[in-house]
Amino acid sequence: MDNIKQGGEFDFIRYIKTQAPTNADIPLSIGDDTCILPSCEKESLVSTDMLLENIHFRQSHASPELIGHKTATANLSDIAAMGGKAKYFLLSLALPKKLKETWKELFIKGLVNALNEFDVTLVGGDTSASPDKIFINGIILGESVGKPVKRSGAKAGDFIYVSGYPGEAAAAIDVLEKHSSGVMVHQKILKLAQEKHYKRQAELRLGAEISKRTLATSMIDLSDGLVGDISHLTLDFGLGANIWEENIPVSPHFDSFVQVEQKEEMMLNGGEDYQLIFTSRLNIDSREFAEIQKMGVRCIGQVSNTEKIILKKKNGEKVELKNKSFDHFA
Ligand code: ADP
Ligand code: MG
């Protein structure tokens, strides 16, 4: 009933198999009832992430390759947030019958290329028809590098660090939404926005470096927005945070993407950056930080025990920030 069938589903799975190179370490990959994976000596890290058409992506925003890339990054980023190494990926798809063969193939290309960058192998999945929209679900398997870095563990006084430019992905999708609704956008800006939203890189190298050196007391990937994700490391455990506005790195692309007045909102509450936020007892000038400073990490505040997130603005004013991260059920 739910199969794409008749040369559809099975040809597509055969195509996926040709695009998903395996290696001698994997006893059995795509094609059987399950894959067989070598057992790992370290702790296994397992997560899953869903991407639904018109909620997490739109066909009108970007090429199928870029949507494949985002699928990989969203899943890889959870392993990065534990400081782990990503290893295997499973992909479940529900696709409308009318979806073009080339869309499917390019999606797989974009996904597999993004996985290849981190030596992650596509080892299985499931394929079904969908009545109307595209549903994508990924399962990512990895292993710990050092000790996995959990969301819990921060203490008052710890410094708060962030990689990349918070809000950049949200500012980029703002451009793509405008374009999809018929607003004229310059071709160059459109291309940049597609790259900055859909072609983000999971911070696996940074995460592993942090874990290996035991630098962090807690860590999360930036997917709900700066305030939302800092809340997950602090408010969720009866702590708070003081954030210093002047230290928050400002994306060089904001001016191309959004109005000046929108910048702060994007920086504080824009999601899907897939960067890392972590807390550490260590000061940014400590010797242990030398390597990861080069990877673009900035200290933006400190953990407090007030159960509030306070932003110290550039003019010295202090404001309490409310968590406005996107709630699917709100
Ligand atoms: P089953 O009927 O046992 O679920 P399938 O015909 O769905 O088997 O799948 C056959 C093989 O193809 C399995 O190894 C499965 O993991 C793989 N596979 C199916 N869909 C996908 C997909 N979207 N991506 C990767 N592998 C897939
Ligand atoms: Mg199946």
Image: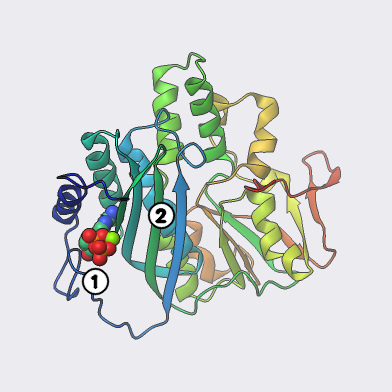
Q: Is residue 122 visible?
A: no
Identified by mark 2, the residue type is: Asn
Horizontal relation, residue 29 to residue 138: left or right: left
Q: Secondary structure at mark 1?
A: loop
The residue identified by callout 1 is 35
Q: In the figure, 211 relative to 189: above or below?
A: below
Dividing the picture into quarters, in which one does residue 208 lie?
A: bottom left
Percent coordinates x, y for residue 147 in the rendering: 49, 79
Percent coordinates x, y for residue 249 in the rendering: 60, 44
Label 2: how many residues lie within 10 Å, few (<14), some (14-19) or many (20+)? some
Q: Residue 165 or 175: which is nearer the viewer?
A: 175
Q: Is residue 227 visible?
A: yes
Judge: label 1 CB < 8 Å from ligand 1: yes
Percent coordinates x, y for residue 66 in the rendering: 35, 39
Residue 137: give its label. Answer: 2
* Residue at image point 26% right, 49% down: 113
Q: Residue 272 or 56: which is nearer the viewer?
A: 56
Judge: label 2 CB < 8 Å from ligand 1: no
The mark nearer the N terminus, 1 or 2, is: 1
Q: Quadrant of ligand 1?
A: bottom left
